[in-house]
Image (cartoon, helix red, strand yellow):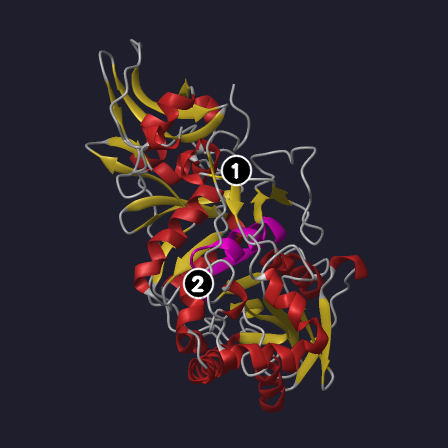
Amino acid sequence: MRSFIDYYYIENVNESFSIPNDFQKLIKDLIGNESDSFFASLQSDSPTSVRYNRDKFDLPLGLQRVPWADSGVYLDKRPVFTLDPHLHAGRYYVQEASSMFLEQAVKTAIGDNQKIIALDLCAAPGGKSTHLLSLISDNSLLVSNEVIRSRVPILIENLQKWGNPNVIVTSNDPAGFQRLPSFFDLIVVDAPCSGEGLFRKDNEAMKEWSLANVELCSSRQRRILSDVWPSLKPGGVLIYSTCTYNLEEDEKNIEWLSQQNNVESLRVPISPDWGIKEIDHKGLFAYKFFPHRVTGEGFFISVLQRKSGATSRNLPKQNRRLGKLSKSEVALLDGWIAKDGVLEVFKFNDQINAIPTNTFQIVELLSSILNVQVAGTPVATVKHNKMVPEHAFALSKCINRDNFIQTELGFDDAIKYLRRDNLQIDTNQKGFSLVTYQNQPIGWLNLLGNRVNNLYPSNWRIRMNPNQHQ
């Protein structure tokens, strides 16, 4: 049996690059005599880190832990992740370690609050949203938003692989959330930025960098913050982050926001061993990650609490309702869903979906206000009086696995399945079968007695040939 992500590897190759003079000056002004160590670190390979989905995987022993993230680990080598079935099962997410510090910020923000409504405003490709789903309770709701339509599909894919039903995906401009005044308990704004913190990983980001682009990004970030702030309820918390170092996009933006609003800066507990630089900028706390100090890339984060405003959620009048299932549809769905009574099943865009019962009315409200792309977990569609399971349902926490035929695949067949190739499986059974790899679902097959249909989503299929990486 192959172990977790240990099959194919690629070499880290850090290309040589020229560091812009303006950026060199910016860094020297920021960190002074540490700048030589900083620039030397840009010539080293980026560390590889992943964050486990503890609903699907126990944390392996013997791996170096990311100290500020309970489920984060570093890998000694960088695998070809595309060729690992565990990735496609949603058992882990490949994420840069510094950005996992969101976990500490969220713990500071929500404390023991077991039921919140959270917004991830700039969510694609989904790293912070999947992390948030692991941090908030099952009774909470996450609105995962991406304004750029072309980036919505990868966000949906990663969220559905993670498997939580308490999330909706939207595609709205930040200004659209002003229709929900004083609504969210927690807002995460991982703002589009000049990308300075990713220079080691992405040489193109360095080539495109300029002071003019920094100013452009700063202006855009302020517009985003200004637009979304009214939707944060009093006492609620906004977490602002970038992958930059400069003052314009970082400290000066939180200073600007605090000048426009009644804000309290929350201090996040950190260990001196972590190497994180705590900033006190005019009474506003922030945290900066430099690659010569931490095992990770450049990152900035600050936690800001709204201190005044309307004291209750002002809910607009609903003008759209989620659909109800017919009696025949309820009967067809019998036995499919785990946790009966905890999940509400409804119709959304001719699809049967499931979401935690206690969040249903909120989702119904949001579906009348926002451009909702996906609500909860897609379970099935009805075709010719028969339930056809959705791929997302196979990967979800909602599924009652015992209700379905299960077909376990070895590594080679699992890769064929993920490539949407034809499979030769000796079976006389008929019906929809849950496909598993090392006992973890990765999708569906339709068993037809003498042959099988591969139901892996065509838009998710992997195109990489494993023979090229042996």
Amino acid type, label 1: Arg
Q: Going 53% across and 36% down the picture, which residue do you hit?
A: 339
Residue 407 percent across, percent down from the top left: 39, 19
Residue 404: tell me if it is visible: no
Amino acid type, label 2: Asn
Compared with 440, 373 (above or below) is below
Residue 132 percent across, percent down from the top left: 57, 55
Of badges 2 and 1, nearer the viewer stands 2
State yes or no: residue 128 in magenta. yes
Q: Which residues are magenta?
A: 122-144
Residue 22 percent across, percent down from the top left: 51, 82
Q: Specify the label residue 298 is tagged with.
A: none
Q: Specify the label residue 91 is tagged with.
A: 1
Q: Going 35% across and 59% down the picture, which residue do you hit?
A: 151
To which residue does mark 2 refer? Answer: 203
Compared with 29, 61 (above or below) is above
Q: Nearer the viewer, residue 28 or 169?
A: 28
Q: Nearer the viewer, residue 346 or 271?
A: 271
